[in-house]
Image: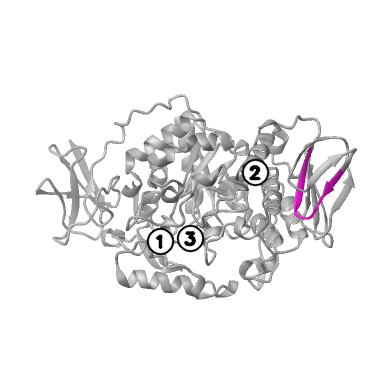
Amino acid sequence: MTRFAVWAPRASDVEVQTGGRRLALVASDSGWHQADDPEAGPGDDYMFVLDGGVPLPDPRSAWQPRGVHDTSRLLDHTAFPWTDSGWGGRELPDCVVYEMHTGTFTPAGTLDGAIERIPDLVALGVTAVDVMPVAAFPGRHGWGYDCVALYAVHESYGGPDALRRFVDACHRAGLAVIMDVVYNHLGPAGNVLGAFGPYFTSRHRNPWGDALNVDGAGSDEVRRFIVDNALMWLRDYHLDGLRLDAVHAILDTSAVHLVEEIATRVHALADELGRRLWVIAESDLNDPRVVREPAEGGYGCDAQWSDDFHHSLHSALTGERGGYYADFGELVDIASALRQVFVSPGQYSRFRDRRHGRDVGRLLATRFLGYMQDHDQVGNRARGERTAALMSLGRLQIAAALVLLGPFVPMLFQGEEWAASSPFQYFTDHQDPLLATAVSEGRRAEFASFGWKPDDVPDPQDPSTFERSKLDWSEVTDEPHATVLRWHRDLIALRAVNSGLRDGDRSALFVEHDEAARTLVMRRRGVTVVCNWGDSSFECHLPAADAITSAGAWVDDGMIHLHPDSVAVLVSGTAVPTP
């Protein structure tokens, strides 16, 4: 017995087409249409027919085995043989997060392929994996942010049970799993929601067009559609957290913002399930309301990404000043990000030509994720170069030390830990020629503010753009990759044994810098990070301590010596972990 149900308030007659027959659904005053079918069961394909029109996939379809344009398939969420009953989750402040893209993480480009690399993540020391969106999108490959079937796992990645196998394997290995979800827009191809009801509104527009209708007439069911989706991933796929994409583009004038509703419902589900669940937001507003508690006027998210830390570090280490890097570039910006999270907590932004942001007050730094690379900051460069292509080995090690020993929850982007040589470029597989052309041309046009030439931008539709973005795991044991990997492992191990590095207390953090000499010293909880990316060698007196040093740095007789582009980590009161 299967109950077919769909919200289609504008339709007079709704049928489900399955098994070569059609069954009429019964309408209710709420706009829902439903009927029980004793013949249908898991594995059966179906589509909905509205007022005699063309058959359409189910907006809440859990399985689209032939792609987003074709039939939906019934799925029993309870049939999978889970082995993670003892898993209770992790505390987010204790985590080191690893962002990965399923299609480029391994040669296979599948979730089952990713399982084979879990031992490498465990050996690295990371404790949580942030998977870029796996909800179904058109074509074979893409970043995933143009998903249109929000309840289905992309078939090229292996489908729904492959995601369950991946999560189950991660939990057995002690890894939490976060997944990116996109609630600010749907992709332009394969999006049928508008045919079913008022899912979109022209009252608000964002960079992708009409916004999702989360605050207008009929929005109660639209919000329910989104919130139910968030809960489904956590409940039915045992995920530990969600990363909400670009919440600043969720345009909502309701008394309770959609993001707050999601966070509240997720935390209630955590209590119900008896395990930790997180909501992590991406926001470019520099507004702490995203992570403040609802009782304090906030949305109640557990954490948010901190772009200011990335921008200040990247600009200082590379010298880039184009685009949004116009607001950064000095060592004082890194110091400000470490001390106060936002470099611009209400000050004038040259890039925006207005005041921007708000002070975070006494919020712990562990309510924010800090990183040197992520999919946006790498993939939204013209050529998708990683930082390894932009700076010296020593500067890579400086960046890693400040990220992994800094006050924020640290995050790495796949391959960063060994300075992967492969780029991560923007790739698509749109089947509509007009859309494919528009995406390719638009991609070239958007980089003008950074001074990048249109001819430098790879064609997203060219299959080679996708292929060259795949990690080359064979290079891990070669130099300098092996050195970079050891450096990351040592720093993560140090963070693991020093609980003070994970408390997020910014009052216990001290930063000194010399703008002219290009040196910076960060002290926190018995750990001192001394960085030199100036043109001259640098030395100073420091108390006796154990040390982890990059090439070009050494300690003797209470003196720390650093050649240009080198870093030393000194530890007092805690043994330096050995590889």
Give the CA separation, mark 1 to mark 3: 10 Å
Confirm or deny contact between disc 1 and disc 3 (CB under 8 A).
Answer: no
Q: Is residue 133 above or below residue 426?
A: above
Image spot of residue 383 (x, y percent) = 52, 65
Which quarter of the figure is the N terminus placed in? top left
Q: Count up the numbered dots.
A: 3
Where residue 164 appears, x then y in whole percent? 37, 36
What amino acid type is highlighted by mark number 1?
A: Ser
User: What residue type is disc 3 on?
Assistant: Gln
Q: Secondary structure at mark 3?
A: loop
Q: Which mark is residue 464?
A: 1
Instruction: Determine which quarter of the picture holds residue 571.
Output: top right
Instruction: State whether residue 145 appears in this view.
Output: no
The label on residue 483 is: 2
Q: Which mark is residue 165?
A: none
> How would you rate the neighbour count of disc 2 (Cα within 10 Å): few for under 14, some for 14-19, many for 20 or more?
many
* Residue placed most toward the observer, 135 or 519: 519
The residues colored magenta run 560-570
Select label 2 or label 3 by which is in front.
2
